[in-house]
Amino acid sequence: MVQEYELLYERIIRLVRQRIDSGQLKPGERVPSLRHMSQLEKVSVATVIEAYQRLEAEGRLISQPQSGYYVAYSAQGQAATVPGLKAQERLPLEAREVTVDNLHLTVAEVCADHQMVPFGAALVSPVLLPGDKLARLMGRALRMQPVESQQYMQPRGYLPLRYEIAKRMQSHGVHGCTEEDIVITAGCMEAIAISLSAVTSPGDAVAVESPVFSGFLLLLESLHLKAIEVRTDPKKGMDLGQLEALFQGKRVQSCLLSANFQNPLGFMMSDEDKQALVQLATLYEVPLVEDDIYAECGYGRQVPRSLKSFDEQGIVLYCSSFSKVLIPGYRVGWAMPGRFLAEFARIKLSRTVTSSSPAQLALSQFIQQGGYEQHLRRLRHLLASQVSQTRQAIERAFPEGTALSAPQGGFLLWLKFPQQVDAKALFLQAREQKISIVPGTLFSMTDAYRSCIRVSCGFPWSKKLENGLTNLASLVSEML
């Protein structure tokens, strides 16, 4: 049944692409409405929504509230005007000591400044999140459950919340998951930190993507772990051939990665590659630490499968959080550490004992009340639209030679400029104009991404954002 559904929406996607490429549908022209297209092609409205949202994420369509979908002005010939990204070829496949400079802290402070045009922080705007409702639920918990909210929870976390998380994991393909498999943490980063501590020792090497989320480099440095950057395709993910060579040669003791909507590239690994990677990890006994924090931010109706869903031997330590889709300030994440559960729980107990009691109570109530799925459906649509609008603006404003990612989910874009552009200098100049970005140098131990930046699309499109991108494009042009 799933295969039939996928073929139906793929057929709509192919049809619209053909009409755009042939000129039947012109830039700015309204495409058939959801209902009209469903009648024409004899499919459900839900199928058309799925297809249109994916076309919007590709940058071919753009949605207008209360009006419908329109052909993007750059949909024709997009590949020629904005070239796609390629995997970085010249990466030394060797373990390196991880050392990061003070630029990481400077960038973090700039991204946290609310006066900036917010292209820096990988956060969703508070106006898109149910913060008020969660605050009311937390207040209610403090009044109605004073003992639970003021005392330590169980070290593994609040049982009803773990139960709700386990149910969601089951619905996403992790069959057999129960609340006993889940440990609540202080955000996803703590889950990842404890996972790495459970499967490595100081001096060990960890395979990571390239570019890699800058926060992971900070974490590896703090744990005194080495890193090996693995070639990563912007559309497919890590090079499995390189990974197998590392696994077979026992050159890494773990692998840290995101299979769904990776930060910063936004790719999603195919199910075939996910399964193949888990099989390799199982064969060579290399634990996989999976960061799946963006899984709920896909542009389709279905949450993609995780590496964990293919894990039969407990080799995957799954980590996620509510920070990207509900509320970042509560710092509530979780892990499903598989065969490493006992060691994970021991380390968690020794570090932070437990996680915030009121936050766990509020989140548990929110999910139980049934508003979570409705919120996620709305959020996914808004994120897809915001990414599409930002891509459109970049294509219009930035100079020739700019390469741009086409994420399949999440809300981050990766830009690569001609080599004359120094991303670090661009960051400093943008800061002077009250614009926050993240320079590519933070995403590697090498200088491979010195001409790249990451742009966040977590805030609703506005004139302020449009002007910010225009000013940023001018700064880039001045460097050429």
Image (tube, rainbow, N blue to C red):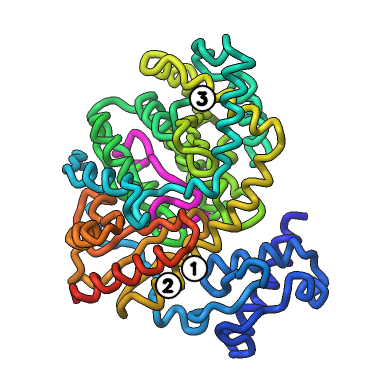
Q: Which residue lies under the disc numbered 2?
A: 393
Say what secondary structure mark 2 lies in: helix
Locate the C terminus and report the quarter of the image it occupies.
bottom left
Locate the N terminus and report the quarter of the image it occupies.
bottom right
Marks 1 and 2 in Cβ contact (< 8 Å): yes
Per the model, the C-alpha gap separating discs 2 and 3 is: 40 Å
Q: Which residue lies under the disc numbered 3?
A: 184
Q: Specify whether 207 is left or right of 157.
A: left
Per the model, the C-alpha gap separating discs 1 and 2 is: 6 Å
Figure check: 426 above or below 16: above
Disc nearest the viewer among 2 and 3? 2
- Looking at the rendering, the stretch of residues picked out in magenta corresponds to 247-269
Disc nearest the viewer among 3 and 1? 1
Magenta stretch contains residue 249: yes
Quadrant housing residue 250:
top left
Say what secondary structure mark 3 lies in: strand
Identified by mark 2, the residue type is: Ala
Per the model, the C-alpha gap separating discs 3 and 1 is: 36 Å
Residue 355, given in percent of the width and then of the height, sits at 47, 21
Magenta stretch contains residue 325: no
Residue 324, given in percent of the width and then of the height, sits at 49, 43
Identified by mark 1, the residue type is: Gln
Q: Kindly tell me whether residue 423 is visible in this rendering.
A: no
Quadrant housing residue 469:
bottom left
Is the magenta region chiefly helix, strand or loop? loop
Q: Which residue lies under the disc numbered 1?
A: 389
Q: Specify whether 407 is left or right of 302.
A: left
Figure check: 203 above or below 237: above
* Label 1 CA crowd tier, 10 Å (few <14, some 14–19, many 20+): many
What's the residue at 65%, 36% (across, down)?
Answer: 168
Figure check: 188 above or below 129: above
